[in-house]
Amino acid sequence: MLPYAIAPSILSADFARLGAEVEAVLEAGADIVHFDVMDNHYVPNLTIGPMVCKALRQYGIKAPIDVHLMVKPVDRMIGDFIEAGASYITFHPEASEHVDRSLQLIKSGGVKAGLVFNPASSLDALKYVMDKLDMILLMSVNPGFGGQKFIPTTLQKVKEVRALIDAVGLDIRLEVDGGISVNNIAEVAKAGADTFVAGSAIFNTSDYRQTIDTMRVALAK
Ligand code: DX5
Ligand code: ZN
């Protein structure tokens, strides 16, 4: 099991001050920057693309940037995000015609690769590609918006994926995304997750450090 990582989703940050917001959340103790890319096609919302990722790198952000692609088609965005300084690129298997090829494209750019599963998606796509994965991301809300309620059946899925990862014995991060807060993070960890995306639960508070510290205290129990 990899060490716990807290990954604030910048979807809930103040976009007019994005560089400063990302800096602030990292100074407050965040480990990974979760970067939600939505295309108003695969999901009914439109957010940010590779130019913004590149701008964060140019601003001086050194932390890992975890690019969560909610776009269809997938492959064109992969090259752009490799170029823009992504550390992880994850995508939804149903959005790619050739999942193995998309994973290879990510890896060939020296970037860590992952697959994302919606709350109702089966895990079948994992079966033949575990060796190419650095991350598995389980959605605990339907993708498209921040601030939604955690879907509790995700916990069972987290347990299943934890068992799969442990069975292959690879260093694959198990990330959970959606509705995570100081109140349920411990339960998600107990089910087997090691990486926790939290958008509104962090950015909608006034003291990011206090919120992240409270999450760490919950994780340590
Ligand atoms: C939803 C995004 C999430 C979202 C999480 O489609 O993938 O990353 O920003 O936001 P919260 O933590 O507010 O549920
Ligand atoms: Zn996300």
Image (cartoon, rainbow, N blue to C red):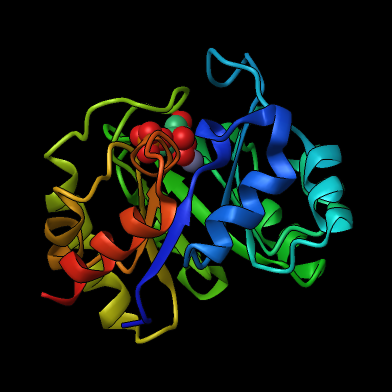
Please report the residue visible at 59 percent of the width from the left and 54 percent of the height from the top. 24
Please report the residue visible at 26 percent of the width from the left and 60 percent of the height from the top. 215
| Residue 44 sits above or below residue 145 on the image | above
Residue 73 visible in this rendered orientation of the protein: no
Residue 220 visible in this rendered orientation of the protein: yes
| Residue 84 sits above or below residue 168 on the image | above
Q: Quadrant of residue 220?
A: bottom left
Question: Does residue 161 appear left or right of residue 13 in this picture?
Answer: left
Q: Quadrant of residue 6?
A: bottom left
Q: Quick one: 2 or 172, which is closer to the camera?
A: 2
Please report the residue visible at 74 percent of the width from the left and 58 percent of the height from the top. 86
- Residue 79 in the image, given as x and y percentages of width and height: 85, 50
Please report the residue visible at 28 percent of the width from the left and 35 percent of the height from the top. 119
Q: Quick one: 59 or 46, which is closer to the camera?
A: 59
Q: What residue occupies the far front of the structure in this picture? A: 206
Question: Does residue 208 appear left or right of residue 79 in this picture?
Answer: left
Q: What residue occupies the far bottom of the structure in this picture? A: 169
Q: Quadrant of residue 47?
A: top right
